[in-house]
Image (cartoon, rainbow, N blue to C red):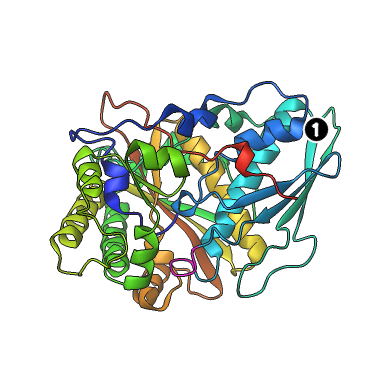
């Protein structure tokens, strides 16, 4: 979830190119937790599967108070260039909270969530708790049917079937997943509004491509991504975060010293031009986009949007839909101002009164496509805070 992910990280695992293996321990969390008498640990085993920007997994959990979980952000795992206001990091925190609450309900207790128990951060994020969760015995707490998709939820960066707009029943399922939440959900690319929606989809594609070009050719956010590249099995297993590169040719070039992660690629370099071309091809293979809008951009609304997005993502998994956030046009660093204003103007949500919190590609995968591989996770041992 989030900003400028070097495309080779997303596409290489699915193309005809030979890929290296992602080590099994790095994705072991997706097999589900082992039995645990402490429902908090068990629930956190699902929460760590939440989508999050650049797969940084910037969460810390304090379990010292029985029956409670205090959650903080690891301030060493933020994106100050790509996400200077911390909005996308907060979306990831919201997705984490939603999966935590769903998992707790599966075991019985109700998750009572208090946001910012020690005060809300201002313009920059800090290490104060973003939530305190009390697990309360409740025989009537409902189980959420979306939780059945928790281990199958993916961010799928592949090309989708552009000949298949989104069926009305599937749109209704996505919409129902966030019904009652104080935000707006919409989708362009519906089968029952094809002619009108197609124009909007094409306009979104144009803005998304421009935003990707801005991010690829702006040094600070691009170098932030470069430093998080993980080439090949050994690096992936060592870090279990960041932007994984599995394409064997790129892994080999990195091992031979031909990839310098300390150097900003020139905007007209072969590498940059090739990635722009590949991203544009993936964008053109997008039959639909969905977006989530809040009235305002408060920290609590950012967390709400993250909770809503993971619900939509789970609902999409249940309906066989691929989903891939395209947050580049929603970035808040200065160079991204033009696409940011353009996407808000196009979607009829003028900032700052309204904020598009999430923009994501949506589509059906080609016939015969298998479930996308999961992203690495650092595991519970990396989660504990004292």
Residue sitting farthest toward the front:
256
**Can residue 244 be seen?**
yes
Say if 52 sits above or below 135 in the image: below
Residue drawn at 37 percent across, 28 percent down: 371
Say if 343 sits above or below 62 in the image: below
**Residue 302 vs residue 256: left or right?**
right
Q: Picture coordinates of residue 57 (x, y %)?
A: 54, 49
Q: Picture coordinates of residue 136 (x, y %)?
A: 85, 37
Residue drawn at 35 percent across, 65 percent down: 223
Residue sitting farthest toward the top:
35
Say if 178 sits above or below 357 in the image: above
**Residue 222 vs residue 295: left or right?**
left
Q: Picture coordinates of residue 13 (x, y %)?
A: 29, 36
Residue drawn at 71 percent across, 27 percent down: 106
Say if 353 sits above or below 127 in the image: below
Near mark 1 (Cα within 10 A), the count class, few <14, some 14-19 or many ≥20, is many
**Can residue 286 be seen?**
no
- Residue 82 included in the magenta stretch of the image: yes
Q: Secondary structure at mark 1?
A: loop
Instruction: Return the residue at label 1.
Output: 109
Most foreground residue, 157 or 58: 58
Most foreground residue, 278 or 177: 278
Q: Which residues are magenta?
A: 79-83
* Occupied quadrant, residue 310: top right
Our reading of the magenta stretch's main secondary structure is loop
């Amino acid at each position: 979830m989030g900003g400028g992910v070097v495309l080779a990280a997303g596409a290489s695992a699915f193309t005809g190119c030979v890929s290296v293996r992602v080590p099994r321990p790095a994705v072991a969390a997706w097999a589900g937790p082992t039995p645990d008498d402490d429902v908090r640990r068990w629930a956190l085993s699902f929460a760590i599967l939440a989508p999050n920007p650049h797969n940084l997994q910037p969460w810390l959990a304090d379990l010292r108070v029985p029956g409670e979980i205090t959650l903080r952000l690891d301030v060493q795992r933020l994106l100050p260039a790509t996400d200077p206001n911390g909005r996308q990091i907060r979306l990831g925190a919201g997705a984490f909270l939603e999966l935590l609450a769903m998992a707790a309900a599966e075991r019985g207790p109700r998750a009572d969530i208090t946001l910012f128990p020690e005060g809300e951060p201002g313009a920059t994020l800090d290490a104060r708790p973003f939530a305190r969760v009390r697990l309360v015995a409740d025989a009537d707490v409902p189980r959420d049917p979306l939780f059945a998709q928790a281990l199958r939820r993916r961010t799928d960066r592949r090309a989708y079937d552009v000949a298949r707009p989104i069926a009305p029943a599937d749109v209704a399922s996505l919409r129902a997943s966030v019904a009652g939440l104080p935000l707006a959900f919409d989708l362009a690319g519906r089968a029952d509004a094809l002619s009108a929606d197609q124009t909007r989809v094409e306009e979104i594609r144009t803005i998304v491509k421009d935003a990707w070009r801005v991010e690829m050719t702006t040094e600070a956010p691009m170098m932030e991504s470069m430093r998080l590249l993980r080439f090949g099995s050994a690096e992936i297993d060592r870090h279990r975060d960041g932007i994984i590169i599995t394409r064997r040719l790129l892994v080999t070039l990195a091992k031979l010293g031909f990839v310098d992660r300390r150097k900003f690629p020139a905007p007209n370099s072969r590498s940059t031009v090739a990635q722009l071309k590949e991203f544009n091809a993936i964008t053109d293979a997008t039959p639909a986009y969905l977006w989530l809008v809040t009235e305002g951009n408060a920290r609590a609304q950012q967390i709400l949007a993250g909770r809503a997005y993971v619900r939509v993502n789970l609902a999409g998994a249940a309906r066989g839909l691929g989903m891939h956030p395209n947050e580049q046009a929603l970035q808040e660093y200065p160079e991204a101002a033009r696409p940011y204003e353009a996407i808000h103007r196009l979607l009829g949500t003028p900032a700052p009164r309204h904020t598009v919190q999430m923009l994501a590609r949506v589509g059906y995968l080609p016939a015969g496509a298998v479930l996308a591989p999961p992203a690495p996770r650092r595991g519970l041992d990396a989660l504990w805070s004292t």
